[in-house]
Amino acid sequence: MKENLFMRAEDDLDFMPIIPLNETDNENLNDIEIPKELPVLPLRNTVLFPGVVLPITVGRDKSIKAVNDAYKADRLIGVLAQKDSTIEDPTVTDLEDVGTVARIIKLIKMPDGGTTVILQGKRRFKVGAVTAEDPYFKAQVVLLQEEEAPKEQDFEAYVSNIKDLASQIIQLSPNIPSEASIILKNIENPSFLIHFISSNLNTELHEKQQLLEIHHIKSRADLLMQLLQRELQFAELKNKLTNRTKTELDKQQREYFLQQQLKSIKDELGGDTNEREVKEMQKKAENKKWPAQARDLFRKGIERLERMHPSTPDYSVVYNHLDLMLELPWEDYTEDSYDLKKAKRILDHDHYGMDKVKERILEYLAVLKLKGDMKSPILCFVGPPGIGKTSLGRSIASAIGRKYVRISLGGLHDESEIRGHRKTYIGAMPGRILQSLRKIKSSNPVMILDEIDKTGSDFRGDPSSALLEVLDPEQNHTFYDNYLELEYDLSKVLFVATANDINAIPHALRDRLEIIDLSGYAVEEKVEIARRHLVPKQKEAHGLKPLNFKIADKVLEKVIQDYTRESGVRELDRQLASIMRYQAKEYAIKGRLKAQLTQADIEKVLGKSRYSNDIYKVANMPGVAVGLAWTPVGGDILFIETSLSDGKGDLKLTGNLGNVMKESAATALTYLQSNARKYDIDPEAFNKKTIHIHVPEGAVPKDGPSAGVTMMTAISSALTGRRVKPYLAMTGEITLRGQVLPVGGIKEKILAARRAGLKEIILCWQNEKDVQEIDSSFIKGLKFNFVKTMQQVLELALV
């Protein structure tokens, strides 16, 4: 009942049926002669009562013909209400049985072709039988007698109460003119009063029809009073909301009222605009594979969304949150390919070398094939730039048949980029992890976390700390995103992190990673990579694919050695691009190309050699030694120069050296000072000479213990006057006891020595195992001297 009360059209309040100026017309209704058969006019959305004058717009062809024929005859017509106002072309069964005989007071032709008739209700009737349906309805009518108003005192009280209730409603309703109250008070006929108020009542059609059908006037008055009481309660409630009185309504009641009013307005406008969106969401959710917890949260969100208006600020927040829940893959997984031979073939085709990584991926696949399920490892590829760490991740995805997604962490300094923002913030979004899963529609992709060593931290949070949860196999099955506000299972994701410098990764995060070191490429590997991948790629990029010309391995080797100094192949790729541009220009001008590029052609295109190995091959003056260094971009060659001058035995260090490197120089000097006679050094030289050690390229910061043996050799060479053997390089940490300790980055250092054209290397004996891991073909022609003491170093190095 309450629902029907609120479903009303406000426009109805603006209209009040015309009252007959002579109220005695209502008293003489029984004296009118009414034929037994009348044309019938179906009415939508209203009921005509006896005595009430009502303007009606007639639009149906049948109805227009019925009105015209009745107007030409005796102007009498039977008016029946439709049971369902939405039916455009009603049949006999769609009409009520009881209606009102009406007189057509006026017939007005409208400019738009429609017809407006002013009807006055005369007598109630009941349909005896329908005699015709075409061209319009005709029916035999059985007139219903009007009961005389009883003279009882309690009935007068009914009438008085009805007038009071109607007056109160008029006062509370701003859309009804106050003059209506005066009109009501001046109506003396109780029957007409009941009919008049019933006609104006904002209530459901079937309730008005019920009022018309009741024969006993007292029962009719009783029902009308109940309906007026309900209408008064609604008017009072609405008045409170409109005037914003201090007494606030109960929150649920207020929301219910507003929602029902909103629903009514939407129905009038032709339906709810957001209902379709909500239904589409519910339909998607039916077929969604997700955990029960997610399903319950979605159901609550949908229920909340249905109660909200699209214009409210929270609507878009709730809608976007539900949309994310629907678009996340949850329990959608791609099927892994367990063909290990095929996987190995793909990995070998895409990347030359990198055997350690390939073996690790194949091991993971083998376990997955046997067990059927396992937590994905968290791999971290550490190595210099340009060696293919990121592209290796794509190859892994291709090999095991998974989707691939890459997240760049370089420069990331906001924790919310990983965990997401609270959805209540303006512009809030889920974290990058969930955004990536949403994009690729799979919960078990290969996810590359690129440049994990380059995340920053400031007042907005520490992303590397947020990654602890993501990259911990014991925790990431319940990864919590602040925007989603729900746990998400990341345990099936194969995370592959990449980094250049492992020391820049926080210890707690490093502890969760399975570190795989990727060294730089040897010249032979670079030649193979260029021949297999880089040259075909650049030929295609420059439109030279159809043209048949070759670049010999010797030519590629010249480009690598004379024009690049890197561990990876990015600079090599750029040099090859320069060669291809030259070839494209030649072909465009001459229309043909040489069958094979020569070394002379390379010099013509790229100019004179940028790097030369001659500097390492000449015999240096005493006091100069060549060391090997590791950098984040690969191995490098380091000159260490020592000079003696008159002084007081001071030690000067220049070349932008770090604390560890300065301490290595001090250790070397102390060792030589304590063993001066053993190495034919004048002990007085340490008191009378100032020893100056300089490491060239002063703008580049340098640090680490691995230059210890090189510094000790350079100082010894300067003090004894003996030159250091040419073609020789060395690396190792020293102690005051004269021992040589192992250092890291051996492969990168050896490859740097090979690139520089050096022939002999001195290493700690404990680094021999690192040398054995390098492909023998890459170190062919290099002689290794493995030492335990500093005495052995000096015996090998000084001539």
Image: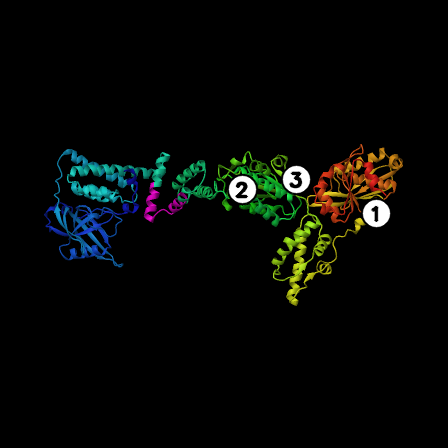
For label 2, count other residues whose C-alpha is less than 10 Å away and answer few (under 14), some (14-19) or many (20+): many
- Identify the residue under disc 2: 433
Taking the image as drawn, is residue 698 in sight? no
Q: Nearer the viewer, residue 201 or 383?
A: 383
Q: Label 2 near label 1: C-beta < 8 Å?
A: no
Q: Amino acid at mark 3?
A: Ile
For the N terminus, the quadrant is: top left
Q: Nearer the viewer, mark 1 or mark 2?
A: 1
Label 1 environment density (alpha carbons within 10 Å; few <14, some 14–19, many ≥20): some
Label 3: state its secondary structure.
helix
Q: Position of residue 466 (x, y in %)?
A: 57, 37
What is the spatial separation of the Cα atoms under label 1 and label 2, in whole angstroms?
56 Å
Label 3: few (<14), some (14–19) or many (≥20) C-alpha neighbours in 10 Å: some
Residue indicated by mark 3: 502
Magenta part of the chain:
260-282
Which one is earlier in the sequence, the residue at label 3 or at label 2? 2
Return the disc, 1 or 2, that comes first in the chain's sequence: 2
Q: Tell me the SS state at disc 2.
A: helix
- Specify whether 362 is left or right of 95: right
Coordinates of residue 252 in the picture (x, y in percent)? 36, 35
Query: Is residue 621 visible to us here?
Result: yes
- Return the residue at label 1: 620
Q: Is residue 596 left or right of residue 337?
A: right
Residue at screen point 45% across, 39% down = 290
Give the secondary structure at mark 1: loop
